[in-house]
Image: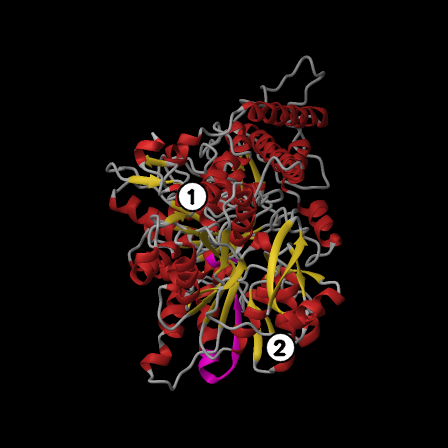
């Protein structure tokens, strides 16, 4: 029977398994240690039309270390993407997720790859969470064949259907009715799985969201609407766009939960709760209180509508990776050096993958005409000069 | 007496046809340069200043100074009543704009790109375009829907579509496509003053381009007529029609063709609806050959309508089949090399013009 610890930032918990030296660990290797630990979320959940789940979350060393590594990887990946964009290797739009990693990581810990996730264009880390590889990310961002969409989609259009990740959508709010549609199909097929449809505070005011929510509630669909509230819709603060920025309450008759989106364990608990709810009672809204360090996209500095103090304040007080680091250290699950080593490993992995992605060639010109249809019917399609470039759609 | 003045700008030769009087005027003052962005900004500024009923509405138009900085400085100058930041809800704010126009105000509704106008298209067509007709003239809708249209650079399938053909097929709408800064100023002013709903299709890649503007263009009363095309380059051998960014491509193609002894006439359509059929047909009757150029999808596109018009009205004058250059018939790919193949390039226009000119060579001789 494992000891449970109450998380406290100021006191060190008693650890009866402290190793005498690093070469003679008396504890099990942390990468496989699944001894349960109970941790309190940073703040309690606030609920609307339902009873909030407990703020005591069960976790274990393996999970915490996985959280740390995964979030460190996502963080490094997004920062590397920033550099690649400035070096003009990534073109067009690039919307970065750094700061919001806990949502992607906490959600995956609560669900399976048979549950569906759909999101908007800030999708790089969500894709990684669903099992996508770093190579698929960087190659796609650079428009190469090894990309998850073979270079034809770009940053906003990552998909991984075999693990039920449905993209990757550029039109604000459109992904929400699509997500409710996935939930419809899941219920129709009696799969006992759920869909998480992610959207931002900017999208939360879209009419189509309420239309889809109404239908989902009428038909008891297993749809979980997750508002990743990073408080700014491009350059517009939430209070300037929404009469009621209490997004978890906006479902009215649909229950909701407000969650600290910078706390991966709170996210995990909320998603677990939501999945159980959705399978029995239909739609529910989760509002993740989160923050993006970058501007809306690479063409937005992110500092004309926010103060630098605000950004650095969040980084200091609420950074999701730092929270897990402190948790790991205070529970003596790893040393500072071991965590730094993980970060170094991750950095190298990202750098090596970028080198590999740069080797991947650009798509063949013949690929211009593939995948227009699933079933081409022998139809002709044309290039810009229809007498020079024409092809039969495969 | 017509004088021809050649002006060099940005490496392009642009012959201008002016009455003799203004030939002297333009020799005496150096033309100022103005970006399309500044042209649009100044047009909005002047029209808002002239008419208190004009107001601007859209995402990030106010405090952010405009997603592409077209509305820079306007919030500071006119205040939050007249420069309204909206939530990301196109159907809602487009409908609100049309309602305000019903009541007599003159909204300028900005779509961050026209791809997002699809969320609001019911209001553009059913609430705006058709109202004057359905009400037998009681409900005119003096609204302007403006924003970037067509491909940018690497923005992918959902952010690259050209909507000219879709909107221009709808009676009740006026659809304008500026190319130069002069076009931007004159057409936007005309659009705001016009009592009917206008869809004003700009282009993101043109915003930063500079064009010379005369004092006449800079004057706050300057206005261009809606429904009139401009002959950017007079020629004898082949007519090339284009609009928006493709006008620049067509002019470059004309320079290349000139070296091969083909004198192309380039028409900047400026207005897709009403389409200036008389200018187009007069040109084809002179040159006997036509190449239409557009960024959008080919099927049911602007070029298809121009071709039909010319076949209907000037069939006997055609010495070669009409050539169409358009965007590739596929969703816009992201990869740079594929994107290049999906958008018309200067060499595509050159090739099509040459085909139109050599079509009289017997097939046997070509083999």
Is B70 on the left-hand or right-hand side of A149? right
Q: Residue furthest front?
A: B1
**CB within 8 Å, label 2 to label 1:** no
Q: Which residues are magenta?
A: B99-114
In front here: A43 or A13? Answer: A43
Colouring mode (rainbow / by chain / secondary structure / one colour): secondary structure
Mark 2, mark 1: which one is toward the viewer?
1
* Residue occupying image coordinates x 45% and y 73%: B197
Q: Can residue B46 be seen at all in this image of the molecule?
A: yes
* Placement of B347 over or under B13, stated as above or below: above
Q: Position of residue B278 (x, y in %)?
A: 40, 67
Q: Tag on residue B48? A: 2
Q: Residue furthest top?
A: A23
Is A180 on the left-hand or right-hand side of B147? left
Residue B192 shown in magenta: no
Q: Chain of mark 1?
A: B
Q: Position of residue B105 (x, y in %)?
A: 52, 81
In front here: A102 or B111? Answer: B111
Q: Chain of mark 2?
A: B
Q: Can residue B62 be seen at all in this image of the molecule?
A: no
The first of marks 2 and 1 along the sequence is 2
User: Which residue has dot 1 on it?
Assistant: B352
Q: Secondary structure at mark 1?
A: helix
Q: Position of residue B10 (x, y in %)?
A: 67, 50
* Residue occupying image coordinates x 48% and y 34%: A151
* Residue occupying image coordinates x 54% and y 74%: B190
Q: Position of residue B357 (x, y in %)?
A: 41, 45
């Amino acid at each position: 029977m494992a000891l449970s610890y109450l998380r406290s930032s100021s006191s060190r918990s008693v650890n009866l398994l402290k190793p005498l030296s690093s070469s003679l660990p008396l504890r099990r290797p942390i990468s496989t240690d699944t001894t349960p630990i109970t941790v309190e979320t940073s703040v309690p959940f606030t609920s609307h039309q339902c009873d909030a789940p407990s703020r005591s979350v069960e976790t274990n060393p393996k999970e915490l270390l996985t959280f740390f590594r995964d979030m460190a990887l996502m963080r490094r990946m997004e920062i590397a993407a920033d550099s690649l964009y400035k070096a003009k290797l990534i073109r067009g739009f690039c919307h970065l997720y750094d700061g919001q990693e806990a949502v992607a990581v906490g959600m995956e810990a609560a669900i399976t790859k048979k549950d569906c996730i759909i999101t908007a264009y800030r999708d790089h880390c969500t894709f990684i969470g669903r099992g996508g590889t770093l190579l698929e990310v960087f190659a796609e961002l650079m428009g190469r064949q090894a990309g998850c969409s073979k270079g034809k989609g770009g940053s906003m259009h990552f998909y991984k259907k075999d693990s039920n990740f449905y993209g990757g959508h550029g039109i604000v709010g459109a992904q929400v009715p699509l997500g409710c549609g996935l939930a419809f199909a899941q219920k129709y097929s009696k799969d006992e799985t759920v869909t998480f449809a992610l959207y931002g505070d900017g999208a939360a005011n879209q009419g189509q969201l309420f239309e889809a929510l109404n239908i989902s509630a009428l038909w008891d669909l297993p749809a979980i609407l997750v508002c990743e509230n990073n408080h700014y819709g491009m350059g517009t603060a939430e209070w300037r766009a929404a009469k009621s920025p209490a997004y978890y309450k906006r479902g009215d008759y649909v229950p909701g939960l407000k969650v600290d989106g910078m706390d991966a364990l709170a996210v995990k608990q909320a998603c677990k709760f939501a999945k159980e709810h959705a399978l029995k009672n239909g739609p529910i809204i989760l509002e993740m209180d989160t923050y993006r360090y970058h501007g809306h996209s690479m063409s937005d500095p992110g500092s004309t509508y926010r103060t630098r103090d605000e950004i650095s304040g969040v980084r200091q007080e609420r950074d999701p990776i730092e929270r897990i680091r402190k948790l790991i250290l205070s529970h003596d699950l790893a040393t500072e050096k071991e965590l730094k080593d993980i970060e170094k490993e991750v950095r190298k992995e990202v750098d090596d993958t970028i080198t590999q992605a740069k080797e991947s060639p650009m798509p063949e010109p013949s690929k211009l005409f593939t995948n227009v249809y699933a079933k081409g019917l022998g139809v002709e399609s044309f290039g810009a000069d229809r007498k020079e470039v024409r092809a039969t759609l495969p | 007496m017509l004088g021809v003045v050649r002006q060099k700008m940005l490496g392009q030769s642009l012959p201008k046809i002016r009455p003799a009087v203004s030939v002297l005027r333009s020799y005496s003052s150096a033309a100022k340069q103005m970006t399309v962005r500044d042209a649009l900004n100044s047009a909005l500024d002047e029209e808002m200043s002239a008419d208190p009923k004009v107001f601007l509405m859209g995402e990030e138009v106010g405090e952010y100074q405009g997603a592409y900085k077209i509305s820079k400085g306007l919030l500071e100058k006119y205040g939050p009543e007249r420069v309204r930041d909206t939530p990301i809800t196109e159907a809602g704010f487009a409908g609100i704009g049309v309602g305000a126009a019903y009541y007599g105000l003159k909204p300028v509704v900005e779509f961050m790109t026209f791809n997002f106008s699809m969320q609001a298209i019911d209001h553009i067509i059913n609430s705006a375009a058709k109202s004057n007709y359905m009400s037998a003239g009681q409900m005119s809708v003096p609204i302007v829907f403006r924003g970037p249209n067509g491909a940018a650079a690497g923005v992918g399938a959902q952010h690259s579509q050209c909507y000219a053909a879709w909107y221009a097929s709808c009676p009740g709408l006026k659809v304008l496509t500026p190319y130069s800064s002069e076009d931007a100023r004159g057409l936007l002013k005309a659009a705001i003053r016009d009592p009917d709903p206008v869809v004003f299709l700009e282009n993101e890649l043109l915003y930063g381009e500079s064009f010379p503007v005369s004092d006449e263009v800079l004057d706050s009363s300057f206005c261009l007529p809606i429904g009139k095309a401009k002959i950017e380059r007079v020629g004898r051998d082949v007519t090339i029609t284009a609009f928006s960014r493709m006008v620049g491509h067509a002019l470059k193609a004309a320079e290349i063709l000139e070296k091969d002894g083909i004198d192309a006439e380039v028409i900047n359509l400026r207005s897709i609806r009403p389409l200036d059929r008389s200018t187009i047909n007069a040109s084809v009757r002179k040159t006997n050959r036509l190449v239409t150029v557009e960024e959008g999808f080919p099927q049911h596109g602007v070029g298809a309508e121009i071709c039909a018009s010319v076949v209907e009205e000037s069939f006997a004058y055609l010495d070669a089949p009409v050539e169409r250059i358009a965007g590739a018939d596929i969703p816009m790919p992201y990869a740079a090399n594929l994107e290049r193949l999906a958008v018309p390039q200067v060499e595509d226009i050159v090739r099509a013009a040459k085909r139109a000119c050599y079509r009289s060579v017997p097939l046997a001789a070509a083999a």
